[in-house]
Image: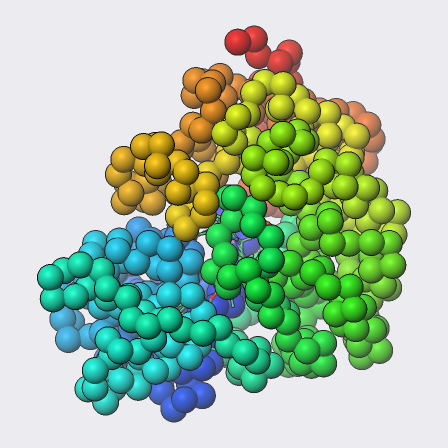
Amino acid sequence: MVYPFFGTGRRSLYFPQGLAYVAAALRNAGHTVTVVDMEGSDLSVDSALARILDSSPEMVGFGGMITRYKIVRELGRKLKKEAPGVFLVAGNSGATAIPELYLKNARMDAAVLGEGEVTSVELADAVAAGAEWRTVPGIAFLDDSGAVARSGKRELHPDLDSLPWPARDLFPLERYMTSMDHRGRRERHLEIVASRGCPFGCSYCYHIYGRTIRRRSPESIVAEVEHIVKRYDVRYTGFPDDLFTSDKTFVLQVCRLLRERLPGIRWSCLGRASTVDREMLSAMRKAGCYWISYGVESGSPEILRRMNRTVTPEQCLNAIRMTREEGISTEASFMIGMFGETRETVAQTVEFCDKADVTAPMLFVTPYPGTPLFLEAEQRGLIPDLEAYVLSLEAADRLLINLTDMDDEELIRLRRWAMGTVGKRYLLRKPFTRIPSLLWKHMVLRGLGHLKQDAEELFSGMGRRPAR
Ligand code: B12
Ligand code: SF4
């Protein structure tokens, strides 16, 4: 199992839950699993290749989201040359959304579509036995004519509690746990997945687990948190689920068990404004919830409507205020550059940040493969070369595709203005605490070298809103 590298110079490491789940399922089924973790072990392509070949695998599985496609392609091509008999398979959101690239250009024999535990075991069983593997449900492969073919549909796993917990022991876990967490702190941390799926249909979001939400039982979730606390001395945890707050009864039950069994634990999750209320937030706080990040995305009702968000700016504002009042830190995320975005709608986002008293990097709206937004961009002819586009995908802080009627330069300037203005006003509302804390966070996360560049960027965006 290979976890491809993303880039250099970062100080936060995110444990690859999906790959670890698949590794556990394969091991449980009797296969011998070795992990080559390029991210956690800081491996170059050549050293990863050497480690893969050293382990004499029958099958190599690649994980990592779409931003890591470049490395999968490089390793796939090299492996096909050096060890042509080894079966190559890729999983995760990229391979699921655009299997054709992984099969044709990265030389994978198969792509596992969606949830990987059962499919990868059936595939490995078939490959190990020299049996027909193309009939395993839930995969894509190239047929004899070189066209992408799909096997039958793989049903989503009906009982998440019965899946083996991620095979964390196969990874250089210490590095993940002691890396910087999302708050810029070094408190031993590790997250666990409590549910899969989300019923909403935001147009920029990719649903690898579909629109039906499946939750683990609160008992199983808290048992896993207890396990990571006891076994790895974890002090801070979190739920990276699409929508941890989807159901009040579920959240209240998890909170009750956390309070009873792990009174000192602290944790975080992602939130959606329309699914939280005061009772839920209060219970979460009492159970150790320390931080919630809300996807707000825009302060303009019209842009939210175009994103199919089904939340209003007022709901977001209420949720943020309520969360703070209950004693939980909040963050909000924003994007700029949706179809229909104008200088006025960006100004509404800036106004929202003022009212909510938040600051946040604002990403460019980026159509990720498999999303409704991507389909629309493709239909409008905005993605003429799929692979070139995928290779350019990073963290959406560079403008890759302009969906607006503004020209690129204007949109870039507008984003810089919005971020600068929001940042400045946020700092000046409480200068004596916020400025030192921002400087410290920047130094810790980005290093001294970036301080000057970041400050210049911030100050250059603080002027008047750019004229057309
Ligand atoms: C946590 C998270 C992150 C973490 C990092 C996680 C990590 N270790 O890589 C952080 C915060 C860093 C992050 C960043 C980004 N993320 Co993110 N992230 C998630 C999130 C919320 C959960 C991922 C997770 O742990 N899921 C739980 C595990 C169990 O599921 P899984 O990973 O999908 O694994 C299963 C299958 O995919 C499959 N599988 C996975 N690997 C393998 C390997 C093999 C061999 C096989 C057979 C199967 C297989 O089986 C697994 C078990 O069923 C997902 C949303 C989601 N619900 O998945 C988005 C998501 C993956 N992120 C996404 C995006 C767009 C990004 C960013 C590009 C955002 C941005 N603009 O900056 C960045 C990219 C950063 C980077 N460095 O690459 C998109 C990807 C869209 C796409 N079409 O690919 C998603 C789907 C969000 C969304 N709903 O749109 N992200
Ligand atoms: S952005 Fe959040 S609420 Fe919207 S569909 Fe994705 S996971 Fe669900």
- In the image: residue 382, left or right of residue 203: left
Residue 394 point in image, percent of width and height: 42, 43
- Residue occupying image coordinates x 41% and y 42%: 374
Residue 281 to residue 114: above or below:
above
Between residues 276 and 327, which one lies in front from this camera angle? 276
Does residue 229 show up? no
Picture quarter containing residue 428?
top right
Between residues 409 and 53, which one lies in front from this camera angle? 409
Picture quarter containing residue 44?
bottom left
Residue 330 point in image, percent of width and height: 75, 46
- Residue occupying image coordinates x 71% and y 38%: 312
Picture quarter containing residue 247?
bottom right
Residue 166 to residue 40: above or below:
below
Residue 444 to residue 406: above or below:
below
Residue 345 point in image, percent of width and height: 62, 23
Residue 213 point in image, percent of width and height: 60, 65
- In the image: residue 88, left or right of residue 314: left
- Residue occupying image coordinates x 76% and y 66%: 251
Between residues 284 and 188, which one lies in front from this camera angle? 284
- Residue occupying image coordinates x 73% and y 30%: 352
